[in-house]
Amino acid sequence: MNNEIKDNETKKHSINTSMVIPLGKLLILLVLSLGLYDVFWFYYKWKYLRDIEGKNFNPLLLTLTMGLPFLNVILPYILFKELLYISTKQNKFFVHFLAFILSFSMAVFLTFLDLKGVYKLFTLLYFLPIFIMQFIINRKDFSNAR
């Protein structure tokens, strides 16, 4: 029984450390892949919640439906909220507020795809919420390693 608990803790810790992505590497992957890496990023975060945290999610279905209207705000909100609960020790209001701000900003930045000219460059800010979320995850995992 004790060995099973230790194995689960070891597995959880090793998966937690695999969630850490250096921010420079993340930025390069997001920019060079022209937005394709964010699909993998979302998929692996949903998969983490299902496999390690025991949430009842279908990572592939959730990742693929994130491009649909309204779901492109709701699904990132749910993912960010769950990751913030795991990664921070903040109160519920803060977690919900930050998750809403991050997911809403992603949707707003994506609306700039329809604009012409210089305004289309604002679409590049779409990666900012993912970058902020990864920064929070990295802080949590690095503090656990100490």
Image (cartoon, rainbow, N blue to C red):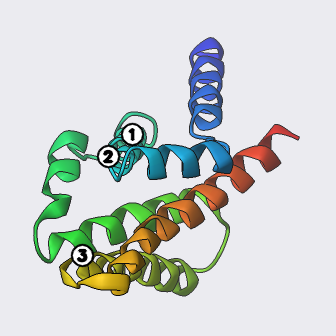
Q: Quadrant of residue 71?
A: bottom left
Q: Which residue is mark 3?
A: 113
Instruction: Say the numbered circle drawn on residue 36.
Output: 2
Towards the viewer: 112 or 71: 112
* SS of the residue under disc 3: helix
Say whether marks 1 and 3 touch (CB < 8 Å): no
**Distance (Cα) linking label 2 and label 1:** 13 Å
Residue displayed at 57% across by 39% down: 19
Question: Which of the numbered marks, if any, corresponds to residue 44?
Answer: 1
State the mark number for residue 74.
Answer: none
Q: Nearer the viewer, residue 32 or 136?
A: 32
Q: Residue at x 32, y 79 (%)?
A: 120
Three-letter amino acid code at the position of disc 2: Leu
Q: Residue at x 24, y 47 (%)?
A: 57
Q: Please state the total of marks drawn on the protein image.
A: 3
Indicate which label's residue lies in the foreground, 1 or 3: 3
In this rendering, the label closer to the viewer, 2 or 1? 2
Q: Is residue 108 visible?
A: no
Residue at 18% from the left image edge and 80% from the top image edge: 114
**Which mark is first along the chain, 3 or 1?**
1
Q: Residues within 10 Å of mark 2 (few under 14, many from 20)?
A: few
Give the CA distance from mark 1 to mark 3.
25 Å
Q: Image quadrant for the C terminus?
A: top right
In this view, 10 is above or below 121: above
Q: Specify whether 131 is left or right of 31.
A: right
Of helix, strand and loop, which one carries label 1? helix
The answer to whether any part of residue 3 appears in the image is yes
